[in-house]
């Protein structure tokens, strides 16, 4: 099949969406499918709409481009709309309604968590043919090989990483941990590393900051630590905590967005009021979660396989519908031809016998 993914793939650190595009493109090509990121060919089987915003750096086409393509070039192309964004994540306005309107070009909608699907539906936005495919990361890069396990005598090394420097990525909690590390009761037991971009004019006091990393360099840095912390608010899915978990780090995660869906059973949930208590609770239960993480399920291989199965099923259904339509049209024409022949034969018979005037 030929699939067009509506995204420009970037090299280096660029956020979770870019990793999704990379992983899906690689998976589909390895399975023998052709993958493009434009609408310039007339035989595209399926289009994946990823971000309908025209001003998005990563978007290679919008829902309006898809509508024009289906109207003027190939009306049989199927469209899947992947929804992984919402107003609640960055406190924007109008994005949810915009995505709802863009969704009208789709034949199917994929949400990246139950949380974001319910968010849209609870607000009255009934998107087309909804289903959930959970996100996942590449285990060839993010895995437990050479993972540093806490020996109980050293400080527990806490880490997080984000490409974006939006405050809602969790900087209220990261700042709180920074303040706690002023206290010897905490600094004697914990240390904190932040990898990625920071909000403008923001600085830590007691935190090691590393510039954004990606791929194996990021994985190697994560594995030097013991616990993964995420305080990101209203995450539709997120990739950062998945990468941490696949590297063998128990997750200390805020009770917000889809994080509980991805992190329950593999770490400890907290809220802003009990964060410091849960920090020590994680210290006590560290080895319990180390064992649980052996079965962490959110991998790009299974995620991409789910997308491929969806695409193939939709294309098969479309071809079946076309075949049924063609068959109906064939029999309709055949019936009309038979009726015409019968009529002409009867007409000639009546004329011959002078029964037709």
Image (spheres, grey):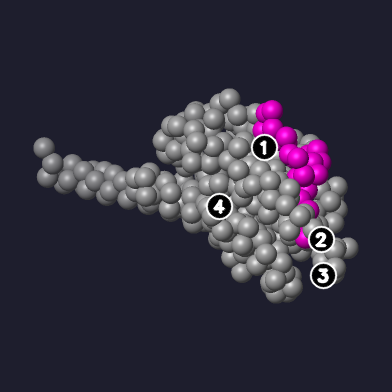
Q: Is residue 268 visible?
A: yes
Per the rendering, the mark at residue 155 is 2
Q: Contact (CB < 8 A) between labels 4 and 3?
A: no
SS for dot 4: loop
The residue at the point 44 percent across, 38 percent down is 96
Distance, label 1 to label 3, CA atoms, is 33 Å
SS for dot 2: loop
Check disc 2: other Cα within 10 Å, few if <14, some if 14-19, many if 20+: some
Please give the residue where the numbered disc 4 appears in the rendered image.
Answer: 272
Distance, label 3 to label 2, CA atoms, is 8 Å
Please give the residue where the numbered disc 1 appears in the rendered image.
Answer: 164
The residue at the point 81 percent across, 41 percent down is 210
Residue 69 percent coordinates (x, y): 53, 31
Distance, label 4 to label 1, CA atoms, is 21 Å
Sooner in the amino-acid sequence: mark 4 or mark 1 = 1
Check disc 3: other Cα within 10 Å, few if <14, some if 14-19, many if 20+: few
Please give the residue where the numbered disc 3 appears in the rendered image.
Answer: 152
The magenta stretch spans residue 208: yes
Residue 128 percent coordinates (x, y): 42, 47
The magenta stretch spans residue 80: no
Q: Which numbered disc, 1 or 2, marks the residue closer to the eye? A: 2
Quadrant assignment, res 275: bottom right
SS for dot 1: loop
Sooner in the amino-acid sequence: mark 1 or mark 2 = 2
Check disc 4: other Cα within 10 Å, few if <14, some if 14-19, many if 20+: few
Q: Which residues are magenta?
A: 189-214
Per the rendering, the mark at residue 28 is none
């Amino acid at each position: 099949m030929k699939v067009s993914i509506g995204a420009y793939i970037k090299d280096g650190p660029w956020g979770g969406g870019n990793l999704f595009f990379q992983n899906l493109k690689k998976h589909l090509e390895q399975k023998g499918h052709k993958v493009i990121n434009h609408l310039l060919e007339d035989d595209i089987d399926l289009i994946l709409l990823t971000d309908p915003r025209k001003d998005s750096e990563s978007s290679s086409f919008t829902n309006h481009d898809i509508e024009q393509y289906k109207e003027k070039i190939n009306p049989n192309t199927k469209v899947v709309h992947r929804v992984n964004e919402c107003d609640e994540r960055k406190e924007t306005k109008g994005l949810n309604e915009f995505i709802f309107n863009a969704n009208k070009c789709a034949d199917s909608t994929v949400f990246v968590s139950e949380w974001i699907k319910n968010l849209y539906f609870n607000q009255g936005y009934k998107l087309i043919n909804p289903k959930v495919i959970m996100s996942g990361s590449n285990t060839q890069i993010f895995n437990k090989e050479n993972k540093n396990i806490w020996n109980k005598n050293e400080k527990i090394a806490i880490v997080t990483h984000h490409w974006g420097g939006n405050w809602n990525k969790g900087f209220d909690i990261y700042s709180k941990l920074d303040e706690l590390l002023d206290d010897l009761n905490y600094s004697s037991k914990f240390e904190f590393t932040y990898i990625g971009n920071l909000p403008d004019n923001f600085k830590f006091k007691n935190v090691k900051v590393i510039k954004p990393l990606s791929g194996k360099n990021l994985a190697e840095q994560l594995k030097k630590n013991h616990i993964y912390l995420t305080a990101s608010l209203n995450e539709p899915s997120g990739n950062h905590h998945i990468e941490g978990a696949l590297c063998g780090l128990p997750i200390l995660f805020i009770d917000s967005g889809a994080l509980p869906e991805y992190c329950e059973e593999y770490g400890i949930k907290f809220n802003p009021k009990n964060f410091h208590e849960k920090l020590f609770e994680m210290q006590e239960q560290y080895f319990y979660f180390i064992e649980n993480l052996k079965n962490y399920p959110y991998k790009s291989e299974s995620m991409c396989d789910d997308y491929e199965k969806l695409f193939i099923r939709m294309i098969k259904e479309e071809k079946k519908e076309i075949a049924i339509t063609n068959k109906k049209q064939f029999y309709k024409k055949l019936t009309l031809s038979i009726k015409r022949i019968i009529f002409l034969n009867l007409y000639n018979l009546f004329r011959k016998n002078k029964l037709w005037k």
